[in-house]
Amino acid sequence: MLEVRNVHKSFDHNEVLKGVDFKVDKGEVIAVLGSSGSGKTTLLRCISFLEHADQGEIIFDDFQKDITKVTKKEIRKLRMKMGFVFQGYHLFRNKTVLENVMIGQTVARKIPYAQAKQTALEMLEKVGMLNRAGYYPDQLSGGQQQRVAIARAMATNPEVILFDEPTSALDPELTGEVLDVMKKLAAEGTTMVVVTHEMGFAQEVANHVVYMEDGVVVEEGTSKEIFTNPKQEQTRRFLRRLLPDYDYSI
């Protein structure tokens, strides 16, 4: 469904992505793991054209092109197929919860107001935020804001939703409510790519796990393969650091 090949990206003289290949199949939940600075977020941003890659190829359904030569019109069409949930929510502070969820439909997709409102209300109900539809972001907790951001991403009916560390800005007690929504989406067959430090989510929910280090994909496989029998020492070292009781099969 979605694939990028040999993606490179540098900032000044710092090469952040060094030839990354990445593929997402329909209905798949992929957890992307790695330490800060490994290139995870940059990969998501290049896939969604929030950053422009220096080199590579993108394939999305029947579209295939050099990632550096995609036109603005083509980028807009590709973005229409993607939802993006940011670490910092990115809600409009001067708009209500309902308006935040509607705006991607009415502005970007020109969907009629009544239809956009109905969809927004349905998505807010799905994430447990319907009773806050008239609130403003500053009246919500971090976990509630992130659930609104997920509803906004879902409202445009994207083919894939990209999550950039959606719980890292939250207090531990608020993380669970966001992960519960994401687990529900996964159970419904939503295609998701999740950059995360939540090892429990990666083990329990992800079909596929990708471990990145220093701008490259070191190892990938099923959740069971990565968490019980990683082949690369870098992966084992990373898991030992995050999971104190971690052990692996040989």
Image (cartoon, rainbow, N blue to C red):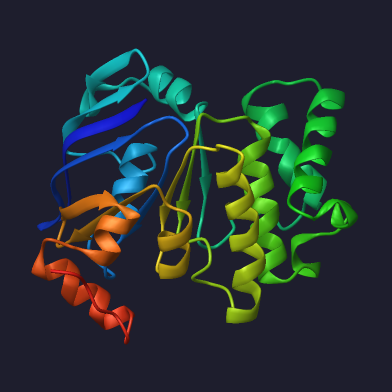
Is 145 rendered above or below residue 3? below
Label tally: 0
The quarter of the rendered structure image containing the N terminus is top left
Q: Position of residue 135 (x, y in %)?
A: 86, 59
Q: Position of residue 159 (x, y in %)?
A: 51, 29
- The residue positioned 48% from the left and 51% from the top of the image is 163
- The residue positioned 26% from the left and 65% from the top of the image is 228
Is 43 rendered above or below residue 114? below
- The residue positioned 61% from the left and 39% from the top of the image is 188
In the orientation shown, which residue stands out farthest toward the front?
250
Q: Quadrant of residue 69?
A: top left
Q: Position of residue 177 (x, y in %)?
A: 67, 66
The quarter of the rendered structure image containing the C terminus is bottom left
The answer, for residue 92, to whether it is visible in the render is no
Relative placement, left or right, of 95 versus 57 is right
**Front-most of 190 and 19?**
190
Relative placement, left or right, of 247 versus 82 is left
**Front-most of 231 and 127?**
231
In the orientation shown, which residue stands out farthest toward the top?
62
The answer, for residue 228, to whether it is visible in the render is yes
Is 35 rendered above or below residue 27? below
Q: Position of residue 203 (x, y in %)?
A: 41, 62
- The residue positioned 34% from the left and 38% from the top of the image is 47
